[in-house]
Amino acid sequence: MVLRFEPSPSAQSVESLSSAYVRVRDTSMLLAAPLAAEDQVVQAIPEASPTKWHLAHTTWFFERFCLMEHARDYTPVDERYHFLFNSYYYTVGEMHGRAARGLLSRPTVEEVASYRAQVDDAMLQFLEQHADDKAFAALVTLGLNHEQQHQELLLTDIKQVFFANPLGPAYRELPEPTSASPAPLAFLARPGGLFEIGARGDGFFFDNETPRHEVLVRPHALANRLVTNAEFLEFVHDGGYDEPSHWLADGWEIVRKLGWKRPLCWSEDTAREFTLGGWRAVDPHAPVCHVSYYEADAFARWAGARLPTEAEWETAAADTPVDGNLLDTDHLQPVPADRRAAVAAADADATSAATDQRGLISQLWGDVWEWCASPYAPYPGFVPLAGSLGEYNGKFMCNQLVVRGGSCATSRDHLRPSYRSFFYPRDRWQFLGFRLAKDA
């Protein structure tokens, strides 16, 4: 079975908010369609959530923040759901423990689907009646972007459910991998100076992308592509996981405590990896994924390089179109870099280090979220959203690191150069990878 996604509207077209609502909400159900009811209630690790919970939580978001606060005559489908499906919004009430979401056999998958349908009917009716309400439209747009985040989580979380299953089931059949050899790794010179990063002010953006501000970027070089499985395997075979000099102290403690010897989802002999299509041979030319910040940083030290900062990444991506191996391409797995683009970048670097290289760096979008050597912290002058929605991003700005660029499970119309996500440095269950950087 191959999923077919409704394309997001082009920049030239105008999509009504109601149409966008239907499209995004339908995509969530489409992503859940290959799963049995039994699949949708399992929670493999504390960081992940069952499919059913994602479908219910995103519905709760619209019910709680849109309908209950704006539709005066609205009656909640089931008051108990506000405890079960709240995530971390303590200003609106307590919630069921995150690590125990897999214990919720009720409501059933069917009941959650009914919950979604009832809320969707109420939302579409209210949208029709308040089509000119700009504040409400902004709230709904936030909810749709929130749901797109959970669509990616739905895929990454079910991958961990199936990875934990000795039967090694597949989410669905994936396209056959194309193991094209990428161009040799090359470092492209990037200029230093004062640059602006952050949301430009056109279209939707999250509060953590604001305010747009100046940053000082030192002259540096970025790798023309992501680090591959074959390159990471060299690190493994060279005893990278056994040499403490490569590792940050916290990373080395985790390596010793948890016995890490390879990326998550690789077989013990490093010959196979688990994908949403089941077990496959490791594609040597595809980007390595399911590695923590600690592993990415250790590899970079071993390779005589470093990880890029988020300002270096954003200035490289600032004028590049969002185009790559994203959810819309339907690979659901990182794929090798386009060799032609990498060759062009390498040739340009060899001929003129002063030439603007931004359009020649490949894989900036999709495949894997790229770890950056930047803490997830507020920008100067950051002000979170007012009210309960201020809990969405701001309160997590501590002890986490920035990732950029989206993954093979991220929707194309969800991304932009200023988009910043974040994970704890130990996290590996997401499609997390990296590219290298160097000082000039």
Image: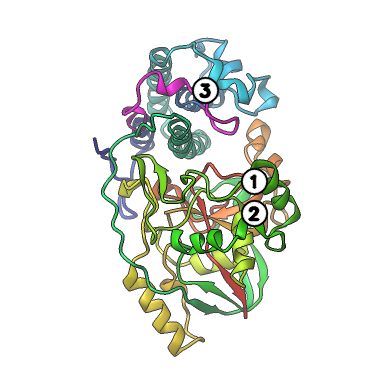
The residue indicated by pointer 1 is 426
Q: Is residue 409 left or right of residue 294?
A: left
Q: Position of residue 94 (x, y in %)?
A: 68, 19
Quick one: SS at disc 3?
helix
Mark number displayed over residue 60: 3
Q: Quadrant of the N terminus?
A: top left
Comparing marks 3 and 1, which lies closer to the viewer?
Answer: 1
The numbered mark, 3 or 1, whose residue comes first in the sequence reads 3
Q: How crowded is mark 3: few (under 14 residues within 10 Å), some or many (20 or more)?
A: many
Quick one: SS at disc 1?
loop
Q: Residue at x 50, y 59 (%)?
A: 417
Q: Which residue is drawn at 46% across and 45% down?
A: 267
Which image quarter: residue 96?
Answer: top right
Does residue 408 show up magenta in the picture? no
Q: Position of residue 79 (x, y in %)?
A: 56, 10
The residue indicated by pointer 2 is 294
Q: Position of residue 270 (x, y in %)?
A: 46, 51
Contact, mark 1 vs mark 2 (Cβ under 8 Å): yes
